[in-house]
Amino acid sequence: MRRLLAASLLTTMLAAPTVWAKDELVIGITQFPATFNPSIESMLAKTYVLAFAQRPVTAYDASWRLSCLLCETLPTLENGLAKVEGKGIAVTYTLKADAKWGDGQPVTSDDVVFSWTVGRHPQSGVASAELFRRIASIDVKDARTFTLHIDKLTFDYNAINDLRLLPAHLERSRFQPAPAEYRNRTAYDQDTTNPGLYNGPYRIAQVVQGSHVALEPNAHWGGTKPAFKRIVIKAIENTASLEANLLSGGVDMIAGELGLPLDQSLALEKRHGARFAVITKPSLTYEHLDLNLGSAVLGDIRTRRALLLALDRESMTRQLFDGRQPVAHSMVPPPDWVHADDITRYPHDPAKAAALLDEAGWKPGAGGIRVNAGGDKLALELVTTVGNRSRELVAQVLQAQWRKLGIDLRIKTEPPRVLFGETVTKRKFSHMAMFAWYSAPENVPHSSLHSDAIPKADNSWSGQNYTGYANPAMDRLIGSIETELDRPRRKALWRELQALYAEELPALPLYFRADAFVLPKGLKGLEPTGHQDPSPYWVESWRWE
């Protein structure tokens, strides 16, 4: 077990050397999952925790190459495991022979079919149903081999990262009686420590709601044996408290995917660089404001443009993040090869912003707050995660800069499990929600921008288009990108999509994040990926030295 040398005073304890053993690792993150079901909701905390205990069929590695995690060979047109059929494609996978659930049951083609059945059901409430809908049928060859018949040939035809497998032998009886109730009946939340729910190197052995999750090795894992007998993931939503826990030995490391903001990590490195290694990596993470386009105020594009023009985002990122997190002009981060620079930008221009608000009918009123002809004040509410110091600072900057233009911004914070489990997922936010999208390389934003991905009560809040954005031109571009195999032509289409996004502003871009991993000097083998497939997918390579 990890132990700290005894100390009588806090200052002595903070300075004390740490004695590391090799059987436990305690990780700090800033959110606690709202659910543990792999397919329901898209909260990053859940993705991170399950990455230790679940393996997708395919994932992008740290070199951004698509690879097999649960399959034997990645199907391609070149190796004959993928074959064009009409306008679609047939793709054949074989699951690894040693893949087993934690109760010893093999991972089989039946699990694949069941997971697809859940994902494509209109009332199951999965976060992203697009892949499930695209799979028209599945041919089961044997217990481990299956062929997906996909209704259209896409450039990423063999990337089935979103096909999260569910154990049919445990979940089928919870799904079949009432699919609309599945999200409330899943064993992942009602029987979370059941070993049979997990097929990765670890399984969830303990859950203390809002506090921590403990993982222990999966006795039936057939891959490389992991180094730790126990991994504890602690959720500490206040980033100042998270840092204090690190320094006092309450946690061994802070995950870069969901940890300290960059500014806080860099300051920590200056003070405690002898104890910790701080690894920063530019990532495919887009910090932004999702807008409720159903709002009468934000439904006017002139108001949305004015809001962005009123912000001095360059100064904000320079002052808060030492210029290391670049201003975003669309939702595609610079490290992605399809990123476009030549699109509409919104530099700080208060005069132009004021003119747009005047044109939209918002005139200066008493107390400096703008009002419309009906006497309504230009008052907006922004909701974001509680305890995140960077977001708190950014929200205060937005509030101050918009106040100069006559806009009253009220800031509201919520625990992440509430924000992502209810407020955002069910589109309950009045005007704005500040959070980040964590993307895969060349991630087509079907789930967040296509009109068929707007969460509604009648689809059990499936989809991630929380803004309610619906534009036929965007729908066509998304479809064209998905089916364009020629890279130069596809990049041109991506440029059109980013240009349309910048013109329409369904969300307000803020900046692109860099992940900061704060690791003890003795921890080796952890390799940041910089995208939505997190580092614990390769936890069997982590070790103490």
Image (cartoon, helix red, strand yellow):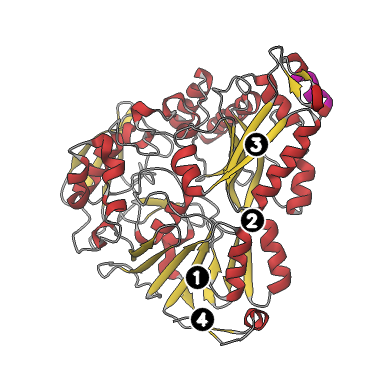
Sequence-wise, which precedes: disc 3 or disc 1? 3
> Mark 3: which secondary structure?
strand
Which label belongs to residue 261? 2
Quarter location, residue 406:
top right
Q: Give, as a three-letter code, the residue at label 4.
A: Glu
Residue at the far right in the pictured view: 351
Q: Residues within 10 Å of mark 3 (few under 14, many from 20)?
A: many
Q: Give, as a three-letter code, the residue at label 2.
A: Pro
Specify whether residue 60 is in view. no
Which label belongs to residue 545? 4
User: Can residue 108 be found in the magenta stretch?
Assistant: no
Reading the image, the residue beneath label 1 is 525
Sequence-wise, which precedes: disc 2 or disc 3? 2
Q: Residue at x 50, y 52 (%)?
A: 64
Q: Residues within 10 Å of mark 1 (few under 14, many from 20)?
A: some
Q: Is residue 476 left or right of residue 118?
A: right
Picture coordinates of residue 289, whole percent (x, y): 61, 36
Which label belongs to residue 509? 3
Q: Residues within 10 Å of mark 2 (few under 14, many from 20)?
A: many
Sequence-wise, which precedes: disc 1 or disc 4? 1
Sequence-wise, which precedes: disc 4 or disc 2? 2
Please name which of the two marks, 4 or 3, marks the residue nearer to the observer: 3
Picture coordinates of residue 60, whole percent (x, y): 45, 52
Residue 278 higher or lower than 439, as above or below = below
